[in-house]
Amino acid sequence: EDLIGKHKFRYGQAETENQVGVATGLAYTTVGGDTLQIEVSLSPGKGKLILTGKLGDVMKESAQTALSFVRSKTESLGLDANFHEAHDIHIHVPEGAVPKDGPSAGITIATALVSALSKQPIRREVGMTGEITLRGRVLPIGGVKEKTLSAHRAGLTTIILPKDNERDIEDIPESVREDLTFKFVSHADEVLKIALEGGGVQ
Amino acid sequence: EDLIGKHKFRYGQAETENQVGVATGLAYTTVGGDTLQIEVSLSPGKGKLILTGKLGDVMKESAQTALSFVRSKTESLGLDANFHEAHDIHIHVPEGAVPKDGPSAGITIATALVSALSKQPIRREVGMTGEITLRGRVLPIGGVKEKTLSAHRAGLTTIILPKDNERDIEDIPESVREDLTFKFVSHADEVLKIALEGGGVQ
Amino acid sequence: EDLIGKHKFRYGQAETENQVGVATGLAYTTVGGDTLQIEVSLSPGKGKLILTGKLGDVMKESAQTALSFVRSKTESLGLDANFHEAHDIHIHVPEGAVPKDGPSAGITIATALVSALSKQPIRREVGMTGEITLRGRVLPIGGVKEKTLSAHRAGLTTIILPKDNERDIEDIPESVREDLTFKFVSHADEVLKIALEGGGVQ
Amino acid sequence: EDLIGKHKFRYGQAETENQVGVATGLAYTTVGGDTLQIEVSLSPGKGKLILTGKLGDVMKESAQTALSFVRSKTESLGLDANFHEAHDIHIHVPEGAVPKDGPSAGITIATALVSALSKQPIRREVGMTGEITLRGRVLPIGGVKEKTLSAHRAGLTTIILPKDNERDIEDIPESVREDLTFKFVSHADEVLKIALEGGGVQ
Amino acid sequence: EDLIGKHKFRYGQAETENQVGVATGLAYTTVGGDTLQIEVSLSPGKGKLILTGKLGDVMKESAQTALSFVRSKTESLGLDANFHEAHDIHIHVPEGAVPKDGPSAGITIATALVSALSKQPIRREVGMTGEITLRGRVLPIGGVKEKTLSAHRAGLTTIILPKDNERDIEDIPESVREDLTFKFVSHADEVLKIALEGGGVQ
Amino acid sequence: EDLIGKHKFRYGQAETENQVGVATGLAYTTVGGDTLQIEVSLSPGKGKLILTGKLGDVMKESAQTALSFVRSKTESLGLDANFHEAHDIHIHVPEGAVPKDGPSAGITIATALVSALSKQPIRREVGMTGEITLRGRVLPIGGVKEKTLSAHRAGLTTIILPKDNERDIEDIPESVREDLTFKFVSHADEVLKIALEGGGVQ
Ligand SMILES: [Ca+2]
Ligand SMILES: [Ca+2]
Ligand SMILES: [Ca+2]
Ligand SMILES: [Ca+2]
Ligand SMILES: [Ca+2]
Ligand SMILES: [Ca+2]
Ligand SMILES: [Ca+2]
Ligand SMILES: [Ca+2]
Ligand SMILES: [Ca+2]
Ligand SMILES: [Ca+2]
Ligand SMILES: [Ca+2]
Ligand SMILES: [Ca+2]
């Protein structure tokens, strides 16, 4: 019911301050790119994973993969090794009526999770996109041009992209590219260093 | 079987007194706006969430998001941090045979939940609509005109709307607008302050 | 296999004595009204709710709503506050091969539940129909004329109807109406007072 | 794969001795009547109910209803009140590839359950058919003529039928009727008295 | 992907030595008979039953029935009465991409289960087919001729068939029949005596 | 969304160093062969198995079969007999948006599992394909030519194939075959000896 009206083409805007548990991803739809917020909330619980925001199966699996990556890295990230058993983890992606799918939010989900667990704020000027694997490899994604344009429009200034997408930025207009800092990464550890205030270590 | 007959177009009416665990939302259908009651009931239990009232998937996810928001705010709201584990929570939206969907009841569900948990009555003259995110952000919704007309018809006098819907009220006839107080909010904390007798704090 | 034969149009008949855990509801189908029995059985268990009788989703949700209403009222009803955790509750609606749906059995289910829990018999001459909400509100239903005719045919003499259906009884033939006592209710507490031998309190 | 060949029209035959946990039901298909065996097996467990034999939803619900009836009658039947929590209960209806549905095996399932729990053998000459309700009422079923003919062919001599099916036996040929003893029942307690060696009490 | 190529019509071959937890069944497809291996593996666990090998619903129910039969016979089989609660049981039927269904592997599954639980090897020259009921009855199956030919081709020499299939062997060519020993059984206890090295008792 | 663009035909490349918990499988699609990585991650947990990477039912069953094989071999592999109960096991196959199915990754999954559990690295030059059974038998698969060409293209030098696929390598061009060492195996124990640095024993 809420999808009709003036707000249909509402574009994302950068956060006004660094926040804990909220990372900015870049999405790619048939009508162009957009930014999206990945929100993570922890509550005392028993290890339940709640995924909401009309997410497709691939995106849900991507969230599980990001979570297992973080769970396997608790020691090097300075996190409680048993956080999973003592908390319920809710990952939500507004806007709730807009269907979302694909693996390209993998590193964004991992970043929001580590932020929520470590209480380290995420730099508000950073947007990112990239598939994550279970061991933290960052795999290339599609729609680099459209995603980057939407990030620029939203006021983001640092863009994290997979190393294997490096050649795609030649498609982005010079006038946009000069406003942005691109970070090309091959592992999620690099993403955490760039996006988190504390660099992902405690 | 019960959907045919004289009562087909029964419209909502404001409660006759302030109540605990019941908030008034505004809905938008193809044939116009309507008010709906969000009822929340707590019973001794083990953290089970029961959602009834022929709710679609987006509305169910919206209820989960509202609940996680409340669970993450127990401290500032003065609620028991472990309420979730000691209670089963039932959220029901009459009328049970009418299908309902969409994210716009998010803040209404959050308000009914906090009322039920804190035993603070909800002001009977308040109607509201707005999507909620996991951290309590209030996102804009559609159908402001129709929703407001139905709230007016039901006898409500205070209407809570998302900040990003402020410009939509120019579509509402002057004769209706003058009877109503509009509250434009960007965070669920503001909703609780307006709608709950005690302002959402204990 | 059992649906073909002489018994196809078997109509309900009033119980021959007051019983515990069995309430008489009024149903409305495309070929007219009928009475149905709501049976509730408790066994030592762990809080499992079993719903049988080819019930549709709306009717199942209605049963959950009726149960939560009863669970939230244990104190005022003089019931054990933790009955839910120590028992499995089975709600069955014969005849098992006949599909049933809709919210109008809500107050009937609530009555059968309170009878089974309190061991108070239900008055055999009482038939009822009405949607229940989580806080016990009784909402109007359809098919008042057909339902009342079937109740009359079954030998019932007291009919409980929602307050908002009061004007519908003008459609019922005078010759039938004069045999019946109508009770118009707006809350389930009134239903329990009328239908249970002990008036729903212990 | 196993449904083709010489055995396609294999008819049931009466057991050669009284057995524990196996009751003989009467079924009715588009090509005539047949007998079927309801087998019940108990194993040390945690209250799991396993239903096999390609049973349709109505028949599965009928089995749950029969089980709840037995669970609510443990005291009068001399059974352990907590049997349900200490055992897994498996109800199987051979032949495994033949689909079965409908409520008419209700009293047969209840009888096999009580036999397995009480270790009382079931009289081998008894066949039965009837829907069971949660409080043990026996409701009428269809196909009385075809079911009785198949029972006769199988060598059964005592036929238990619902009271409300009494008039249906006038359709059965005199030559068959004279070989059979009919028992018309309105409650499952009567079924247990007739079918179990010990009459269903210990 | 793996179903295309030279191996499409790979036929089964008898094991080269007696093995624990692997029984040889006989299957019947539209293109003829084949042998299949039923593998059973036990691991320390909590009573979970895992069924793999692209099994249809009837075959899955058949496996559950075989397991319940074995669980109800622990005493006479000399097995630990509580094995079910202390182990997870995995039943697999290679080849994993080939769909399989029907009840005729019942006795084969039971034999593999008892072998795995008792550590008694299964005689490598034995092939078998037959539906099992909850109390161990062996019911007739189809495709005796095709199944026997495939067993012969695989090098098996002892064939266990249901008693009620005895007349079907007249369809098997004399030249094949003379190479084989047929065992006709009516109860699973007989199967265990023939197929297990130790005869199914300890 | 991520499936469109320059990276559509990205082929696999051998790892740059030996790794723990990552094995290289060979896949066969309608457009040719490809390599894929099977990643295994262990976290403190309760025995949950998580399977991601858009896997079809046959591949999921294959993963369960590989896991049960490893669970039944803990003693001979020098693994903790109860690892399953103390850990959650996540098996992921990038790329997350590409559907995968079939049983031919069986031995690859088993190898990655044993590597993750024993912390023994997997030789980076080894690629493998073969269905696994519950007792570790390796069954033949399809697409040997296409799979081998993709392994060669990715820089792998040792190829593990099922014994029953030995004759298929005559289809591979001589110029490719001379660069590769083929290992033909009939049991998963042989796979572990070849692929793991420590030969699968501790
Ligand atoms: Ca947007
Ligand atoms: Ca610029
Ligand atoms: Ca309404
Ligand atoms: Ca006015
Ligand atoms: Ca009726
Ligand atoms: Ca009259
Ligand atoms: Ca038959
Ligand atoms: Ca005769
Ligand atoms: Ca084969
Ligand atoms: Ca010969
Ligand atoms: Ca690839
Ligand atoms: Ca070469």
Image (tube, coloured by chain):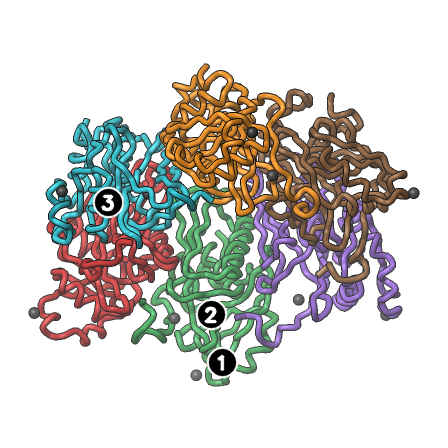
Chain colours: A brown, B purple, C green, D red, E cyan, F orange
Q: Examine the rendering and report whether any part of residue F104 can be seen.
A: yes
**Residue pictured at 24% horizontal, 42% vertical:** E107
Mark 2 nearby-residue class (10 Å; few <14, some 14–19, many ≥20): many
Numbered badge on residue E150? 3
Q: Disc 1 to disc 2, how far (Cα)?
A: 16 Å
What secondary structure is found at the residue carrying circle 1?
Answer: helix
The answer for which chain carries disc 3 is E
**Residue that badge 2 annotates:** C26
Residue type highlighted by circle 2? Leu
Residue type highlighted by circle 1? Arg
The one nearer the camera, B120 or A32, is A32
Q: Are labels 1 and 3 on one chain? A: no
Residue type highlighted by circle 3? Ser
**Residue pictured at 64% horizontal, 36% vertical:** A89
Q: Position of residue F118 (x, y in %)?
A: 50, 19
Mark 3 nearby-residue class (10 Å; few <14, some 14–19, many ≥20): many
Q: Are labels 2 and 3 on one chain? A: no
D132 above or below A163?
below
F81 above or below B100?
above
The one nearer the camera, F149 or D178, is F149
**Residue that badge 1 annotates:** C177
Mark 1 nearby-residue class (10 Å; few <14, some 14–19, many ≥20): some
The one nearer the camera, F104 or F41, is F104
Residue B151 position by quadrant: bottom right
Q: Nearer the viewer, mark 1 or mark 2?
A: 2
> Quadrant holding ligand 6?
bottom left
Numbered badge on residue A183? none
What secondary structure is found at the residue carrying circle 2?
Answer: strand
